[in-house]
Amino acid sequence: MIFREAKTTDIAAIQIVRHTVKENTLSDPALVTDKDCEEFITQRGKGWVCEVGGAIVGFSIVDLKEHNIWALFLRPEFEGKGIGKELHRLMMDWYFDQTQDLVWLGTAPNTRAEEFYSRQGWKKVGMVNKGEVKFEMSYEDWVERSV
């Protein structure tokens, strides 16, 4: 397994991963364009990928502009192997190296993602968007969790 920063040349593979998920699927694949991905990993924040055997199997992207987790997805056959946890750690460490502002995310209720974020120490604070669970993480909570 190789973890590294995402590059614009990874966008096609990132999109494939995004469209293979079984939960938190996009109602319309055109909602997240290649241009969106490029903007988020080059201007708004940063992204990371995990490669296994030369293929990208997961990715994470954080948005410094809106202070939120834009994406954390794995191909279903690679879940439960610690990949998501490491992509999450890389993303969060980088985010809090840039700012101490609160970070948030939204995810569909009653999903593996909701359970994952709860286990990572995120706090449920309500609902956002169209019925997604809203989570928040403070710098202090992240630092306390990381020691």
Image (cartoon, helix red, strand yellow):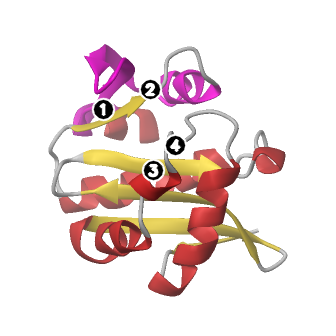
- Of residue 47 and residue 21, the one placed in the foreground of this image is 21
Depth-wise, is mark 4 or mark 2 nearer the camera?
4
Left or right of residue 16, residue 138 in this image: left
Which mark identifies residue 21?
none
Dot placed on the residue nearer the N-terminal end, 3 or 1: 3
x and y percentages locating residue 7 in the rendered image: 48, 82
x and y percentages locating residue 27 in the rendered image: 50, 39
Which mark identifies residue 121?
2
x 65%, y 59%: residue: 17
Left or right of residue 29, residue 32 in this image: left
Question: Mark 1, residues whose alpha carbon is within 10 Å: few (<14), some, or many (≥20)?
Answer: many
- 49 is higher (above) or lower (below) than 22: below
- 44 is higher (above) or lower (below) than 81: below
Q: Which residues are magenta?
A: 112-141
Dot placed on the residue nearer the N-terminal end, 2 or 1: 2
Q: Name the kind of residue labelled 2 in the image.
A: Gly
Tag 1 residue: 137
x 40%, y 53%: residue: 31
Tag 4 residue: 26
Q: Secondary structure at mark 4?
A: loop
